[in-house]
Image: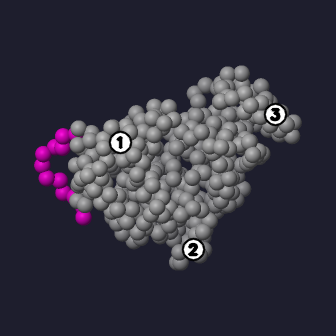
Amino acid sequence: MSPTLSPEPTRRESLVWPDAQRQADFNHWLAALSGSHGLLPDSLRSASADASFRRYFRIDSTQGSRIIMDAPPDKEDCRPFTKVAQLMQEAGLHVPRVLAWDDARGFMLLSDLGAQTMMQVMQRDDPWANQGMYLQAVDALIAWQMASRAGVLPVYDDALLRRELELFPEWYLARHRGIAVEGELRRTLDEAFGRIIANNLAWPSVYVHRDFMPRNLMLNVAPTLGTGVSSLPPEVSVSPWGGPAAKLVVAPTLGVLDFQDAVYGPITYDIASLMRDAFLSWDEDFCLDITVRYWEKARKAGLPVGNDFGEFYRGVEWMGLQRHLKVAGIFARLTLRDGKPLYLADTPRFINYIRATCERYRELRPLLRLIERIEGIVAVNGYSFGRS
């Protein structure tokens, strides 16, 4: 999941290391880099906390600030980060550049995209005031998807979707709630999971960020040379899916972070992630507005989003359901296994997302009833029209 920016800098002497050897390795690596990169070691401070085992520091240099990633190699593999960063740069997105990398010890020097995320400046009481930022995010997303090629990133297939869904019964139900996952409960989950996976895999595949949301989008990023996005469609070129495609010509202004888990999977995923945020909720009219604008731009760009927005929105909802079940399990795991309890405080948001989608579709009603029993929710009497 995404990093949380520190509100105040923590200077070098206050940084905590898991052991003396890793601290010594880091100090040796930093000293060796300082001269060639103009780094100022005494300015080192914490930049963010992460749900993974990665940590990020900020350090000043004679050319401006830089970011250092601390990723213990026995817990984190930095190779996907560097691969996806290169793919995103080629697609015209603004992402951190790798300036130096000690693969064996898990230290990396990166360019700094700034300290202000889209999330931090969000006007939560007025969603429409944020429309412009969301449309910038949509343009960056389309640029990323337009660069898609099969066989480059891991496939978001049945096995991966199923493993992610199983985080919900394993960590949220069994370990967090103390509920035995067996009998009728297990059968209800299996049937629902099968439907969710089948619906999601019915959509064509593109590059998928997997955490494309305001906490991972940086503001006030200076444009760089290369291709990017402005309004669509500008010049026409050939789409990888056949038919007309927009030629992307202007660099986006949003920076993108936390992309190392990118895969090749359903085109519905990242827009669901953007509009059904793990840490922020909007009314459906705003979600619909941004989603339909994305769909219209994506169609003009030649992306495989179909010709029926109603069907596409259904796909987004079913994809969001898979993500919310997964993340509820991840947040429980972060609390119980990793000692990071703050994430679990956002669980009610996920339960609301899950219930809203399950109530809308008749075939998901058994899952809805299961969730409401677990959460002790008494449903309002009355008949609700669902979509088939």
- Give the residue pinned by disc 3: 28
> In this orientation, does residue 138 appear?
yes
As for residue 47 lying within the magenta part, the answer is: no
- Report the Cα–Cα distance between label 2 and label 3: 47 Å
Disc 1 designates what residue? Answer: 174
Residue identifier under label 2:
240
Q: Main secondary structure of the magenta part?
A: loop
Label 1's element? helix
Query: Residue visible at 55% across and 44% down?
Result: 216
* First reached walking from the N terminus: tag 2 or tag 3: 3
Task: From the top left corner, tell me how far across and down residue 335 is, in percent.
Answer: 46, 34
Crowdedness of circle 1 by 10 Å Cα count: few (<14), some, many (20+)?
A: some
For the residue marked with disc 2, what is the amino acid? Pro
User: Which residues are the magenta region?
Assistant: 377-388
Residue in the picture at 65% in, 49% down: 77
- Image vertical order of residue 7 relative to residue 218, above or below: above
Residue 237, above or below 386: below
Query: Which residue is rendered at x = 48% and y = 36% of the image?
Result: 337
Relative to residue 215, is residue 308 drawn left or right?
A: left
The residue tagged with tag 3: helix, strand or loop?
helix
In space, the residues marked 2 and 1 are separated at their CA atoms by: 44 Å
Amino acid residing under circle 3: His
Question: Can residue 295 be seen by looking at this rendering?
Answer: no
Q: Indicate the secondary structure of the residue bearing disc 2.
A: loop
Q: Does 378 lie within the magenta span?
A: yes
Give the class, few, some or many, for how many residues have Cα within 10 Å of label 2's Cα (few <14, many ≥20): some
Outermost bottom residue: 242
